[in-house]
Image: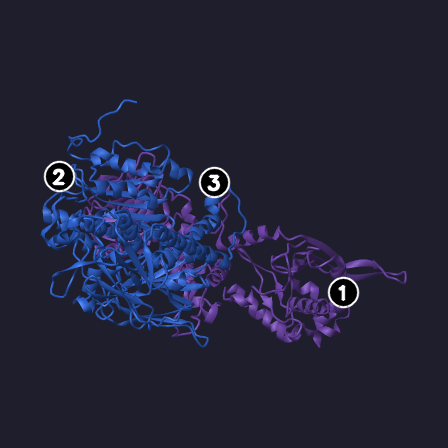
Chain colours: A blue, B purple
Amino acid sequence: MQASLSLPPAAPRSDPGPAVFRRSAFRFCGLRREALGLRSLRPAGSTRIFRSPARTPSRKTVTAVSGNGIGSLSKGFDYDLVIIGAGVGGHGAALHAVEKGLKTAIIEGDIVGGTCVNRGCVPSKALLAVSGRMRELQNEHHLNALGLQVSSPGYDRQGVADHANNLASKIRNNLTNSLKALGVDILTGVGTIADTQKVTYGKVGFPDTEITARDIIIATGSVPFVPTGIEVDGKTVFTSDHALKLEWVPEWIAIVGSGYIGLEFSDVYTALGSEVTFVEALDQLMPGFDPEIGKLAQRVLINPRKIDYHTGVFAKKITPAKDGKPVLIELIDAKTKEPKYTLEVDAALIATGRAPFTKGLGLENINVVTQRGFVPVNERMQVIDASGNLIPHLYCIGDANGKMMLAHAASAQGISVVEQIGGTDNVLNHLSIPAACFTHPEISMVGMTEPQAREKAQQEGFEVSVAKTSFKANTKALAENEGEGLAKLIYRPDTGEILGVHILGMHAADLIHEASNAIALGTRVQDIKFAVHAHPTLSEVLDELFKSAEVNTGVSPPSVNEPVTV
Amino acid sequence: MAGVGQLHLGTPFLPSASIRGRSSGGGGSRRLTTRIQAKIREIFMPALSSTMTEGKIVSWVRAEGDKLSKGESVVVVESDKADMDVETFYDGYLAAIMVEEGDVAAVGSAIALLAETEDEIPLAKSQASSSSSPAASPRAAETPVPPSPSETAPEAVSSPPPSPKSSQAAVSSTHPASESGRRIVATPYAKKLAKDLKVELGSVAGSGPMGRIVAKDVEAAAAVAAAAAPVSSVPPKSISDSAAVKAPASPAIQLGTVVPFTTMQGAVSKNMVESLSVPTFRVGYTITTDALDSLYKKIKSKGVTMTALLAKATALALTKHPVVNSSCRDGKSFTYNSSINIAVAVAIDGGLITPVLQDADKVDIYSLSRKWKELVDKARAKQLQPHEYNNGTFTLSNLGMFGVDRFDAILPPGTGAIMAVGASQPSVVATKDGRIGVKSQMQVNVTADHRVIYGADLAAFLQTLAKIIEDPKELTL
């Protein structure tokens, strides 16, 4: 599963005050805090995923219906499960539902694959693969250090664009075929919730077809968020949707928003020869990252490149290029609202985050009021109505609920919901969901940032320690001449619990999973440090990271594995 | 792993000798004994690991003028292993930053000055500028900063503190702001380059879309500034004279030293290496200049220069041989240039520049001479704009004034041909009618790109040129 490009919108433009910004900047932490608040930290050795045989009281209704057990679930209903939206979240849920023996349908009004596959992580990875190679080939100094000689590397824009497009269609076909092969019905049209356990769908203007389902999952995802005042023409002022088609490579492009999407595109555009100007509403670039990682990222990914930036400013008005005039971006101070500057650039990419796509879902039919477009859910992804009650049989996963706008988070939420439908209580630990930014070098993270961990530590009265290792000390990284990078571990010295891991460096996105799995499985630092890593590999960065942590307790007493002689 | 966030280091902030308290003691007297009197302390590049020989300044946490308290982080240093915050061990004011972010300094070398009181900031600044001025070039930071902190002589105290921007100011003062009141539109890379190369963006003319300043404009401006800097080096020199006694007052060449390229030298070097990829050949010709010399004598009083006459003659010859005025850039095609722009190489201190006489075939000799004078003046005052020196289609290089009778020029990449002009000298010649006479003759030698210009082309061109010079009435038309 690819990490999504998605980030929550930077802020509602209607009230872009600093307070609001601070809140939205911590969207990740917001949800993390929520997830954290649900339970106290578990004792050593316990699993982080809840699997309790007994159902919670709130699920009594479901228990009554599903009491007959799997197999006879669809009695009286057209389907056991109907999923609205065939993105990565819906796909993941559908696959798991089939595995659980549920009769499943998926409604898609557009094309299978959703944002991630068609307009997000997948095509962007194709562009980033190209930009990474271009960057390597252009770095004469680096190549010389390796003894390589390459003369005047170049690229064919259409060829690059085709690569991205071909990759998207290939993955889309794979997704479609896997659904079909498993016997999931793909229903074409816009899905609307007519009533509890009742969905209508059909093309706009055609009579709706009504189907009933025992359980419904909303997985409608999100669309690029465009603040008011910005006129998107799709040619000179555009969102990631257009940018991924790579119809042209502007000489100078302003990127509004310096989150994952903006950062990844800055990597692509600068590698292809553009100059980039970031416009960021917060006082610093890359506000979502751990501050230390952000600082290093600025040093590695921004400062040496043809990039400049304006922070603490809003793009109040963006006018596309026309009549021989360039794209005009009027910047105002984020706090005082005073006009600050006007940028004249060739193009502007709006990467201010993503807005949930929940219009036309018929939420009013079941008395659900969205919050800034997001569908309110509890920690089990059950939809909450306007009066605060849970709506039975209705779940919402992925970008539409805004808990964690990442493709693989949506999929994990979908699997968690299917588990619950199947009779196993399950609460997803969002703190174990990794995120990655596919710049060169990559950035990845799981769990809390250092400030978040320290805040929580202060509230709950425990110690926090930080360990760091550098890629400079890693043999494989040095062999690749890619010594730039840092891995950072935030942990509890008293229990050895891993609170967060942040990596910036070569293949960071692939390296993070050792840490995310450790968090998901509740593995402690003092235990994982004995795991062996092949030498020489980049994974030794993490090996060294775990080994450098100082934990005040010994190895967790009940050893899971008995020593086996071979 | 040395993943420590904060380091307590006694060494980096060894107190330096106070200027006032400085006695006759030699370099080794910087001891704690002077500490009470010490007012300005040097901040040294700390040794963060046993293997560290130099450190890179990642970022200055504090800015010049900030008040610092003991224990506060001042700078982040990147060693061979990790990045570490370095904190101050004394209260005071961060007076002057001597090694900028991203630059490298040897372990033990001064990277900043810490003043005890606010009043001493200017003093510290002057101290800093005197020691850092010899290595003002930003790229020079690649070479380790000398480990011994510069010794500031007492005179420095009395001299007015030169602003650290003085050299920059000198540059911009000769560059009138392009258009007053108009804001500057420069691309991100252009801005970065301007900062690195210390180019005032207000003085740069933009050649990009909608007149925006792009990277090559800044590079061009820096090359001009670098070329012209020695010419107008009077103000900076006086500063170094007064402030840094140890710094050599005269720009005498120190033998045995390794000198990094200036921006201009770097650009020339790059161009010269690039020229090796062009297959060139040479054709020489001897031209009798008696008629040209007498014409020159006649109209010299009207401000006509020999350079203008040669440029004019060349341009007129080129109108008849457009292929010699063509250029091949990609190795696949070539361009017949629409105008004849004669670039003339001019030696200036520290390099050479090629002001361009545009449309030399069309402009009359008097205007051409005035234009030439204007260009030379501008070149000396480093005011040449990119379009005044980088769009030549044919280059003239004349070493005749040194008595050189013949030489060979390297073809500048992007042009088709260059002509090396020797001195015109009286020679004994045999004429066709069997007599022997004395005539003034000069030798010219054209280097051309054989991908597009062939031997016969050059021969025909030189024949035409010789005819024009030997019967120069066309030149004054």
Residue at image mark 1: B466
Disc 1 crowd, CA 10 A, few/some/many (<14, 14-19, 20+): many
Residue B100 visible in this rendered orientation of the protein:
no
B61 or A296, nearer to the observer: A296
Pointer 2 and pointer 3: residues touching (CB < 8 Å)? no
**Residue at the spot of label 2:** A43
Helix or strand or loop: what does disc 1 sit on? Answer: helix
Identity, as a three-letter code, of the amino acid under mark 2:
Pro
Name the chain under label 1: B
Circle 3 chain: A
User: Image check: B221 left or right of A461?
Assistant: right
**Residue at left 38%, top 39%?**
A477
Q: Are marks 2 and 1 on the same chain?
A: no
Q: Position of residue A237 (x, y in %)?
A: 38, 68
Q: Position of residue B372 (x, y in %)?
A: 60, 69
Q: Does label 2 or label 3 sit earlier along the sequence?
A: 2
Decide if residue B253 is in sight here. yes
The residue at the point 41 percent across, 50 percent down is: B135
**Along the viewing direction, whichever of B447 and A163 lies nearer the viewer:** A163
Is disc 3 in contact with disc 1, using a CB cutoff of under 8 Å? no
> Label 2 to label 3, Cα distance in Å?
49 Å
Residue B93 tag number: none
Percent of width and height locating residue B267:
52, 54
The image quarter containing residue A536 is top left
Type of amino acid at the residue the image marks with label 1: Ala
B344 sits to left or right of A181: right
Look at mark 3 in the image and give the residue it sits on. A146
Instruction: Establish if B213 lies above or below B246.
Output: below
Residue B294 lies in what quarter of the image? bottom right
Residue at image point 44% right, 57% down? A165
